[in-house]
Structures are given as C-alpha cells and as structure tokens.
Image (cartoon, rainbow, N blue to C red):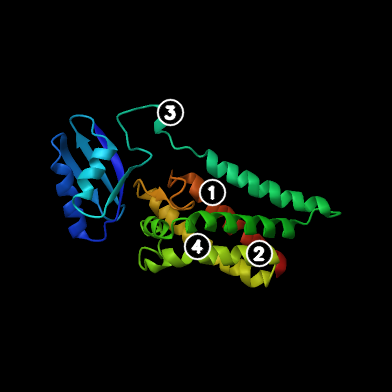
Amino acid sequence: MTHTYHISGMTCKSCVAKVKSALLKLGDITEAEVKLDAPQATITMSGHISTATLQQALTSAGNYTITETDEGHTAVNSDTDKPNYFPIFLIFAYITGASLFVQFTNETFNWMQWMSHFMAGFFLVFSFFKLMNLSGFAEGYGTYDVVAKQWRGWGYVYPFVELTLGILFLLQVSPLMVNAIAFGIMSISTIGVIQGLLSKTNFQCACLGTIIKLPLSKVTLFEDVLMVLMSGVMILMLL
C-alpha cells in the first residue's frame, strides 16, 4: 500500500535525507520518496503504520511534522479520505450573505458597494485564518506561490496585506488604487495556483492557513479568479 503525506519543517536537501532515512528505519516501509518543493513524502509500506508512529520516527530526526494529505490513504476508497470543502463553502455563504444584507438599507442595489463589501469580507476572514498560524501558512504558501517560492518572507507579509486590503475595502478608501493592488496580488496568486494544479503535485492549500486543511484544487482557483474578476470589474467601473 502507498500513502502520501505532507511534511513540514524541511528546509534543505539535508532535511530530505534525514526524513527519508528516519522513515526507512521503520521495518514495514519498503520505499520512501521525499520531496522538498512539495513538501511531501510518498511512502510504500507492507503493513499499516499509524501517522503517530511516523511522527515519532521523524521527531527523533529533527523538528519535522508529518500529516495526511487528501490522498494520505490512497489504498482506501472511503468517504473519510475525500477532502471536505464544506467549511470554505460556508465561509463564502456567510460573506455573500453579510454583503447582501447591507444592500437592504439602500433604495437600489449598489453593485459597486456590494462587491467592495464582499472583497472586504473575503480579505478580512481569510487573513484571520492565516494569522492563526503565520509560520505554518508561510511554509505552506511557499510550496506553490510564485513569489513566496522565491522569497519566503512574502508568506509572512501576505496575510497582513490581505488584512489591510480588507480594511481599505470596508472603508472604501482610494478604491481605484486598492482595487489595482488587489487585482495585481490576486493575479499573481492565481498563476501560482494554476502552476500547482498543472504539476499534479498534492499541495496543501494555504488559503485558510493551517486551521482548515484543504488540498490545492479548482476551488482554490475559483476563489482567486473570482477576486481577480471582481477587482477588474470595479477598476473598469471607476475609470
């Protein structure tokens, strides 16, 4: 049986070697392919080994953490192995509902105001989840984002950029400039997501930080493209 796991804490090729060596010391593991750029491990085992046992082996090798990915148990085909997108759909429903309720106070539906409030809710809520574990988000984001892969510091800055954008959208300060910044940032983020999806690698989506674990998927792409389209439409309306 072959399982795929996400491993955090690896920073160099030496870490990859340590992790692989620690895993292969477990008797039931016949093969372990460890990647730094993902970062993940594809493990082939002759008998079931619990994640706790794998973690114990890695702890003895260094400060590494191993968690199951959405395909952590590829040999099992059950509902428990399927990624649960309900939390992110619920968050979108709350943001959409809250931004629509504001329009009830207007005589006519104000599309510009609604999109601005929706963007504010999106950036504020998503930055909140990222800031719950800033270092964890930065590590995960650095596996697929085009900027964060070159400069890991971007993963630490990005949640604060989202937070600032959320506040500015809510207060409707300098809307043209704010929308231009959002358009640029989300466009770059979209490129990273597309590259991640095309690579067929099991990246962990960092959109909700480490609190809610989701695989990088078309859902991630949809949310990024939606933000790009909304900010683009508002820029055109403001010109």
Residue located at (30% from left, 43% from top): 5
Q: Judging from the image, what secondary structure is the residue with disc 2 in?
A: helix
Disc 4 crowd rating (10 Å Cα; few below 14, some 14-19, many 20+) is many
Name which residue type carries label 2: Phe
Looking at marks 1 and 2 on the same chain, the residue that comes earlier in the sequence is marked by 2
Q: How far separated are the C-alphas under marks 3 and 1?
A: 24 Å
Residue 105 in picture, x, y percent from top left:
82, 53
Name which residue type carries label 1: Phe
Q: How far separated are the C-alphas under marks 4 and 2?
A: 15 Å
Q: How far separated are the C-alphas under marks 4 and 1?
A: 19 Å
Residue located at (39% from left, 26% from top): 78
- Whether residue 42 is visible: no
Q: Nearer the viewer, residue 228 or 61?
A: 61
The tag on residue 169 is 2
Name which residue type carries label 4: Pro
Residue 91 in picture, x, y percent from top left:
59, 46
Residue 152 in picture, x, y percent from top left:
37, 66
Q: Quadrant of residue 79?
A: top left
Looking at marks 4 and 3 on the same chain, the residue that comes earlier in the sequence is marked by 3
Q: How far separated are the C-alphas under marks 4 and 3?
A: 32 Å
**Disc 4 target residue:** 159
Q: How far separated are the C-alphas under marks 2 and 3?
A: 39 Å
The quadrant of the picture occupied by the C terminus is bottom right
Q: Quadrant of residue 36?
A: bottom left
Residue 55 in picture, x, y percent from top left:
26, 44
Q: Verify CB contact (< 8 Å) between mark 4 and mark 3.
A: no
The tag on residue 79 is 3
